[in-house]
Image: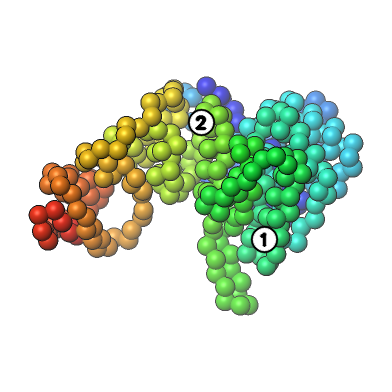
Amino acid sequence: MIQQTNILLCGSPRVGKSTLINAICQQNLTKTSPSLNSVTTEIDRYSYEYRNGQKVHETVIWDTPGIESWNENQVRQYMSSLIEQTHPLCMIYCASPGSFAKLDHVAWLISECHKKRIFCALVCTNMWSARNRDEVVNELCKLVKSVHPTIQEHTEDSVIYFDRVALVTMVNSREYINSDFGIVKPASGIEELIYGIAKCLNRDLMFAWFRSLAQNKSFWTKMSSKLSRLLQIPVDKFFSLFDSLNNYIDSFLFDDFYEPLPPPPPPTTTTTDLFYDAEIVELEKHTEVTFTFKSENSQSFVEFTQYLSKFGAKSCQTKTSDEQSVTITAV
């Protein structure tokens, strides 16, 4: 099991790198000495530990402040040394509307990461701070295409994928407020970025990445449906996630449970299929939720109300419209 996750973080100062990492990891980072041969003042090292009993997983963020101001020799010397010594799981490059970047430096970095089989995530941060966020994303896509001209891109959940080599997306790491114009925008794009990186990594690296995110409960809940398919978790284990989120994540990530699982069974008419694509949502107390669905199996209605009670419903009322249609209201 991988005991340490190294993440390479690049981008100009004040583009929101630290805010992004905090939003991803949901942890307070501690700045420590780099302790790397030939890499000193130009690199900042931040880390935090996650403990599960006697097992400890350390996440280390290697920040390269002001890489755009380095000359070509510095970029190649420092970055080559850093990559060679830390073997980062991925490289996250941040740019925001109005930030400055030497694109040839970034293109070289993408190329070097590819040679070392390091996944690249190019992120437009502070997406609501200016109108030219789409231009930033387009420039980042051009950079990837300049290095990988034969790879066809595809978009999913606002994330642009270049096979399993790189992705480009935009995020807002925390709530954006413009009091002058009365604009309020929620944090967005973080969970999709995390999931996008995960799905492009091999299984060992994916679980090392997930261990770094063990404290990000919003990711585990919001992306639960996608994770159940990505990880091929059987339905019964998937539902145990709802029972005890903390214990499930700990055992799943740290207790060598991550051997490849068999693919999910083909669709059938069993009751568990009704719930396979479930997703956790948070509701205020005393919220009334109504479900209307059809099924030839009347037992599925009973099981569904049991699951609702299991997830916190105080009461459930069932109303039969016809032989196969049932409306269930839960509070």
Q: Are marks 1 and 2 in contact (CB under 8 Å)?
A: no
Does residue 22 show up?
Answer: no
In the foreground, 247 or 331:
331
Q: Residue at x 38, y 29 (%)?
A: 263
Q: Is residue 213 visible?
A: yes
Q: Nearer the viewer, mark 1 or mark 2?
A: 1
Residue 74 in percent (x, y) is at 87, 37
150 shown above or below 96? above
Instruction: Name the disc covering residue 134, or none.
Output: 1
Could you tell me which secondary element the residue under label 1 belongs to? helix
How would you rate the neighbour count of disc 2 (Cα within 10 Å): few for under 14, some for 14-19, many for 20 or more? many
Q: Nearer the viewer, residue 244 or 307?
A: 307
Give the image quarter of residue 238. top left
Q: Where residue 191 appears, x then y in whole percent?
A: 51, 48
Q: Is residue 49 left or right of residue 6?
A: left
Q: Amino acid at mark 2?
A: Phe
Q: Is residue 282 above or below residue 182?
A: above
- Drawn side of residue 26 relative to residue 136, left or right: left
The location of residue 153, given as percent across then percent down, is: 62, 46
* Residue under numbered circle 2: 207
**Can you name the residue that lies furthest to the bottom here?**
181
Q: Is residue 180 above or below residue 318?
A: below
Query: Which residue is drawn at the image coordinates 60% and 31% (left, top)?
Result: 5
Left or right of residue 61: residue 107: right
Number of dots carrying numbers: 2
Q: Which mark is residue 220?
A: none
Colour option used: rainbow
Kind of element beneath mark 2: helix
Q: Position of residue 87 (x, y in %)?
A: 68, 27
State the separation of the CA atoms marked 1 and 2: 32 Å
- What's the amino acid at mark 1? Asp
Q: Earlier in the sequence, mark 1 or mark 2?
A: 1
